[in-house]
Image: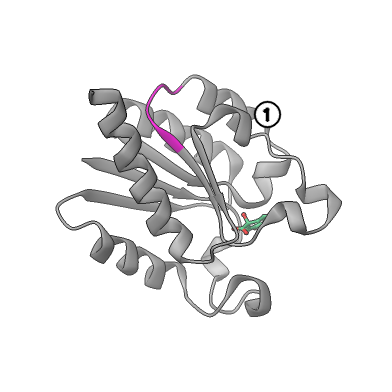
Amino acid sequence: MKISILNGPNLNLLGTREPSIYGHQTLSDIEAMVAAHAPGHEIEFFQTNREGELVDAIQGAAREADALILNAAAYTHTSIAIHDSLKAASLPKVEVHLSNPAAREAFRHHSYVSPVVDVVIAGAGPVGYCLAVDAVLALAERRAA
Ligand code: DQA
C-alpha cells in the first residue's frame, strides 16, 4: 500500500522547536520510526512550509497514493484551501497532530481538516504517526470488505 504522509509549516524544526510540547525527535526520526512500523508498505514523507505546496501534495496523493496522513500544522486552523483539497480527495485520510490542539490555545481549537478526514489522532506525540498508519490500514481493509 502506498501511504503519503504530508507535513506542514515548522515541522521541519522538530527536535529543536518547543521540545516541551513537540519532543526531541526530528521529522527524520519520525519518518524512520514509521517506516519500521509498516514494513512492506511504501511510505512517502513530505514536508513544506508553503500552503499551496500542501494543496499540490494533497492533490498528488489523491491521484497516486492509496491513503493520506496529514499534519497540516498551523494551516489546520486557517486553511480553507486545504479543507477544499481534502474534500475533493476520496482516498482514506487521517489527520495527525503531535500535541492535542484542543487542550491548547483557543486559536488551535478549530480545525478545517477534521470535518473532511476519516480519523483524527492528536496528543500521542511521534507515535501518533504510527497510530495513523494503523488507522489507514484499518480503513483500507474496511473499504475492501
Ligand atoms: C501541530 C499543532 C498545531 O496547532 C501547530 O500549529 C503545529 C503542530 C501538532 O502536531 O501538534 O505546528 O499540528
| Residue type, numbered disc 1 | Ile
Report if residue 43 lies within the magenta region.
no
The quarter of the picture showing ligand 1: bottom right
Disc 1: residue Cβ within 8 A of ligand 1's nearest atom: no
- Toward the viewer: 66 or 134? 134
Quadrant (top left, top right, bottom left, bottom right) of the N terminus: top left
Q: Looking at this view, name the residue that lies furthest to the left.
A: 40
| 15 lies above or below 4 | below
| 11 lies above or below 77 | below
Tell me if 64 is positioned left or right of 94 in this view: left
| x 56%, y 37%: residue | 52
| x 60%, y 41%: residue | 51
| 5 lies above or below 24 | above
Q: Main secondary structure of the magenta part?
A: loop
Give the extent of the magenta segment.
Answer: 89-93
- In the picture of the structure, the residue carrying the numbered disc 1 is 80
- Toward the viewer: 139 or 55? 139
